[in-house]
Amino acid sequence: MKKPDREASRKLAVALVTDLFRHAEDVFSESPESALRFVRKARRAAERARVSVPGQFRRRFCRHCSSFWVPGKTVRVRLQKQKVVFYCLVCRHYFRLPYVAERKAGRRIK
Ligand SMILES: [Zn+2]
């Protein structure tokens, strides 16, 4: 019996998740609710395929309520004690990220 091609389906899932996040970004200004739906879909797709959300999008949604994060609108981003603090304005949960890792990876917070 042939094993299902995990690698291929993972790649597909990552592509789908990327796509969905782009859509979320596109529609956010017009309808934040559709953005939320896209994020939920993306997270579900990632979960099903057991892939993690690609790095560039990991800080673009709330882990608690799945709302799409747009700095100043749905999330407040602050630097505090060597950490980046993301405060979700929708559900009021926040999460912190060490700053050093952020710099090392050369990531930028939009
Ligand atoms: Zn939230």
Image (cartoon, grey):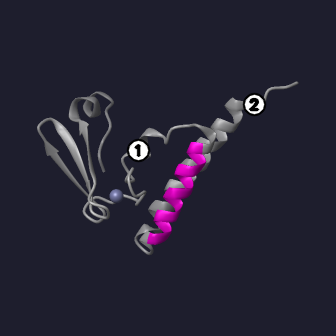
The residue drawn where x is 49% and y is 57% is 39
24 lies above or below 102: below
* Mark 2 C-beta closer than 8 Å to ligand 1: no
Q: Tag 2's secondary structure? A: loop
Residue 7 as seen in the image, left or right of residue 110: right
Reading the image, the residue beneath label 2 is 5
The residue drawn where x is 43% and y is 47% is 57
Q: Position of residue 103 (x, y in %)?
A: 25, 32
Q: Residues within 10 Å of mark 2 (few under 14, many from 20)?
A: few
Q: Tag 1's secondary structure? A: helix
Q: Position of residue 51 (x, y in %)?
A: 56, 37
The residue drawn where x is 31% and y is 63% is 74
User: Which of the 4 image quarters holds residue 100?
Assistant: top left
- Main SS of the magenta segment? helix
Amino acid type for the residue under numbered disc 1? Arg
Split into 4 quadrants, where in the image is the N terminus?
Answer: top right
Q: Residue furthest top?
A: 1
Q: Residues within 10 Å of mark 1 (few under 14, many from 20)?
A: few
Q: Earlier in the sequence, mark 1 or mark 2?
A: 2
Q: CA distance from mark 1 to mark 2?
A: 26 Å
Bounds of the magenta span? 33-47
Amino acid type for the residue under numbered disc 2? Asp
- Which residue is nearer to you in this view: 6 or 108? 6
- Which residue is nearer to you in this view: 12 or 81? 81
Please check the rendered image and state whether residue 40 is part of the magenta-colored stretch, yes or no.
yes
Q: Which image quarter has ligand 1?
A: bottom left
Reading the image, the residue beneath label 1 is 58
